[in-house]
C-alpha cells in the first residue's frame, strides 16, 4: 500500500512525538537488531553510557555477568513469541557501579509479520532494589533474631513475657502458656484478668507497669499464683522497661521464676534451726545455772583461780546464748513469726539502760554515749535494743582493744538517727552494699579468726525495715566504720 506524502509526513511526526514521549518518561532508550546481536542505538542519560554507534558487545558492556544468562533467556522467549521483552536485571552503570534496571522492548514488525527491529526503554530502579535488599536483609536478621529468642525462651523453665502499655500480653513463652493452661491464641492480646489473675494481683501488676512507664525503673517482687497442673506456686519476678531510641517506654518485659522449692527448703531449714536452737537452750540454761551456783561457792572459798575460770565460762555461755537467739530470730523472721510489739517509749531511757549494761559487760573498749535528749518512738523497744547491742558488739569485735566507740543520736524532721562509730579495720567500699545480706561476712584475712555467722547485721536491717526506718554504713579501710539507723518519731495521738 502506497502512502501519500501527507500520510507519510503524519506518520513521521507521530513517530517523532512517540519517541519524544518515551525519551521524557524513561531513563534509557535503545534499538536492537531483530536477533538482538547488534545494538543500533542506546541513549543512557546519566544512567548508562551512550553507544555512539552500533555495537555487538553490548551484553558484556551493559549487563552484569551474573544476569547475562537470565537476559539471554528472556530475549529468546520474546523473539520466539514475537512478544514484549520485559525483565528487571542488574547493569553496569556509567560510573562503573552496579545498578538495576526495569527493561522493556517491543518488536517492530513489517507487513509480513516479521521482526525488523526492537524498540526498548529502561528505567533506573537501583534505589528501589537497594531498598528491597536492605529490607530483606533487615527482615532476615529480625527473623533470625526471633528464631534465636524463641529457641532461648522455649527451652527455659522461666516464664518470659511482654506487656503492652494497655496491660495486655504481647508475648508469652511456652513455659508461661503451660502455667496458664492456655494456647497462644487464647492468651496473647488478653489482659491479666482474662488470663486467670485474681483482681488484687492484676491491679498490683497494672500499678507496677504504670510506675515503670513513669519512672523507667525496674520492679522486682514475689507473689503466689495457681499453676494449671502443679497447683499454687510461689514466683519471683522482675519487670523492666523496653525503651525506644527516643527514650519512650514502648512496652514492659518480664521474667518470672518458680521459687516454690527454694521457699520450701528454706522453711525446712528454718524449722530445723528453730528446733535445734530450742533444744540447745535448755541444757545451756542449766549449765549457766550450775556455773552461777559454783561461782557463789567459789567466792566463799576464796579460790580466785577457779573464780576466774568460772567467769570465763559465764562469758562463753552468754556468747553461745546470743548466737542461739540470733539463729532463732532469723528462723522466726523468715517464717513470718517475728512479731513487732510496738509501744510508745523514750529512746533516751533505752540508751541510758544500754549504757549501764555496756559499762558492766564491755571492759576492753571505751564506749562513749553522747547525751540524748528526750525522744519518743512508737516501736518495739526490745528489738530496737537488740539493734543497739548488735552494732556495739560488732564495733567491739572489729576494732582494736582500748580504742573508743562512740554512740550518738540526732533528730531531723520526723526521724531520729543513731550512729555507732569505731576506729577499727574498716570495710572496703565494694563490700558495703552487701554487709546487711544474710550470712555475709567481709572477705578479709583479719576477720577469719573472729567468731560470727553473718546474721547480726542482717537481723538489724530487717528489724529497722519493719519499723519503716533505714540502716546504712560509712567506712574507710584502716580508719574505721560508722553504722547508722534512723527511725520515725512517734506522732502525737
Image (tube, helix red, strand yellow):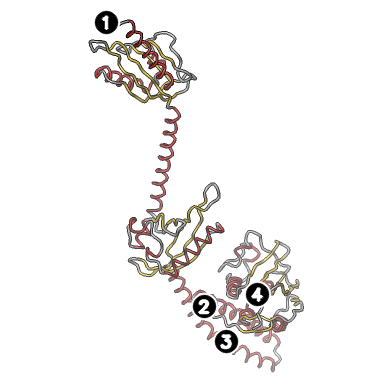
Badge 1 is on which residue?
A: 2
Tell me if residue 469 comes above or below residue 168 in the rendering: below
Indicate which disc, 2 or 1, sits on the residue closer to the N terminus: 1
Which residue is label 2 attached to?
332
Front label number (4 vs 2): 4
Q: Local crowd at mark 1 within 10 Å, few (<14), some, or many (≥20)?
A: few
Counting residues from the start of the chain, the first of labels 4 and 2 encountered is 2
Q: Position of residue 45 (x, y in %)?
A: 47, 18
Instruction: Give the image location of residue 396, x and y in percent.
Output: 69, 73
Q: Nearer the viewer, residue 177 or 40?
A: 40
> Which residue is depicted at the point 59% across and 79% down?
320
**Residue located at (52% from left, 49% from top):** 244
Q: Are marks 4 and 2 in contact (CB under 8 Å)?
A: no
Q: Quadrant of residue 160?
A: bottom left
Position of residue 245 in the picture relative to residue 6 (left or right): right
Q: Nearer the viewer, mark 3 or mark 2?
A: 2
Find disc 4 in the rendering and name its residue: 487
Measuring from the top left, give residue 234's x and y in whole percent: 43, 68
Residue linked to disc 3: 287
**In terms of secondary structure, where does tag 4 sit?**
strand
Determine the secondary structure under disc 3: helix
Tell me, yes or no, if residue 277 can be seen here.
yes
Task: Determine the CA span between mark 1 and mark 3.
Answer: 139 Å
Q: Residue furthest left?
A: 112
Q: Earlier in the sequence, mark 1 or mark 3?
A: 1
Report, in whole angstroms, how far the alpha carbon at label 2 lies from the one at label 1: 116 Å
> Which quarter of the rendered picture does the C terminus lie within?
bottom right
Q: Would you say the residues marked 1 and 3 are in contact, meaning their CB atoms lie under 8 Å apart?
A: no
Amino acid at each position: 500500500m502506497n502512502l501519500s506524502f501527507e500520510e507519510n509526513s503524519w506518520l513521521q511526526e507521530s513517530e517523532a512525538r512517540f519517541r519524544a514521549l518515551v525519551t521524557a518518561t524513561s531513563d534509557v532508550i535503545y534499538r536492537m537488531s531483530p536477533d538482538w546481536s547488534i545494538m543500533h542505538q542506546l541513549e543512557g542519560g546519566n544512567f548508562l553510557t551512550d553507544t555512539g554507534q552500533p555495537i555487538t558487545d553490548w551484553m558484556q558492556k551493559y549487563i552484569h555477568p551474573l544476569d547475562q544468562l537470565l537476559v539471554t533467556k528472556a530475549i529468546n522467549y520474546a523473539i520466539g513469541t514475537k512478544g514484549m521483552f520485559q525483565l528487571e536485571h542488574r547493569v553496569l552503570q556509567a560510573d562503573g557501579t552496579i545498578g538495576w534496571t526495569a527493561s522493556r522492548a517491543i518488536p517492530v514488525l513489517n507487513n509480513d509479520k516479521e521482526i525488523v527491529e526492537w524498540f526498548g526503554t529502561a528505567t533506573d530502579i537501583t534505589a528501589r532494589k537497594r531498598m528491597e535488599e536492605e529490607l530483606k536483609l533487615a527482615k532476615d536478621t529480625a527473623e533470625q533474631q526471633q528464631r534465636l529468642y524463641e529457641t532461648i525462651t522455649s527451652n527455659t523453665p522461666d516464664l518470659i513475657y511482654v506487656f503492652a502499655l494497655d496491660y495486655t500480653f504481647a508475648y508469652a513463652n511456652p513455659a508461661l502458656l503451660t502455667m496458664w493452661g492456655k494456647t497462644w491464641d487464647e492468651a496473647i492480646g488478653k489482659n491479666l484478668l482474662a488470663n486467670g489473675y485474681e483482681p488484687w494481683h492484676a491491679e498490683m501488676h497494672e500499678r507496677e507497669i504504670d510506675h515503670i512507664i513513669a519512672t523507667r525503673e525496674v520492679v522486682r517482687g514475689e507473689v503466689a499464683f495457681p499453676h494449671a497442673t502443679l497447683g499454687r506456686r510461689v514466683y519471683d519476678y522482675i519487670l523492666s522497661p523496653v525503651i525506644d531510641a527516643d527514650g519512650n517506654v514502648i512496652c514492659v518485659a518480664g521474667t518470672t521464676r518458680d521459687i516454690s522449692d527454694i521457699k520450701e527448703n528454706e522453711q525446712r531449714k528454718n524449722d530445723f534451726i528453730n528446733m535445734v536452737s530450742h533444744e540447745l537452750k535448755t541444757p545451756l540454761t542449766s549449765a549457766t545455772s550450775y556455773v552461777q551456783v559454783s561461782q557463789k561457792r567459789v567466792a566463799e572459798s576464796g579460790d580466785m583461780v577457779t573464780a576466774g575460770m568460772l567467769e570465763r565460762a559465764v562469758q562463753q555461755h552468754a556468747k553461745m546464748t546470743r548466737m542461739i537467739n540470733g539463729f532463732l530470730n532469723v528462723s522466726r523472721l523468715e517464717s513470718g513469726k517475728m512479731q513487732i510489739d510496738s509501744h510508745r517509749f523514750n529512746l533516751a531511757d533505752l540508751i541510758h539502760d544500754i549504757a549501764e549494761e555496756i559499762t558492766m559487760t564491755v571492759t576492753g573498749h571505751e564506749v562513749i554515749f553522747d547525751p540524748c535528749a528526750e525522744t519518743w518512738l512508737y516501736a518495739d523497744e526490745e528489738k530496737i535494743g537488740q539493734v543497739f547491742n548488735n552494732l556495739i558488739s560488732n564495733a567491739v569485735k572489729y576494732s582494736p582493744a582500748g580504742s573508743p566507740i562512740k554512740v550518738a543520736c540526732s533528730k531531723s524532721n520526723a526521724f531520729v538517727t543513731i550512729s555507732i562509730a569505731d576506729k577499727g579495720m574498716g570495710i572496703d567500699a565494694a563490700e558495703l552494699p552487701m554487709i546487711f545480706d544474710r550470712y555475709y561476712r567481709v572477705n578479709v584475712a583479719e576477720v577469719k579468726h573472729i567468731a560470727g555467722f553473718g546474721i547480726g547485721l542482717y537481723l538489724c536491717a530487717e528489724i529497722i525495715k519493719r519499723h519503716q526506718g533505714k540502716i546504712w554504713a560509712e567506712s574507710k579501710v584502716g580508719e574505721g566504720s560508722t553504722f547508722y539507723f534512723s527511725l520515725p518519731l512517734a506522732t502525737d495521738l
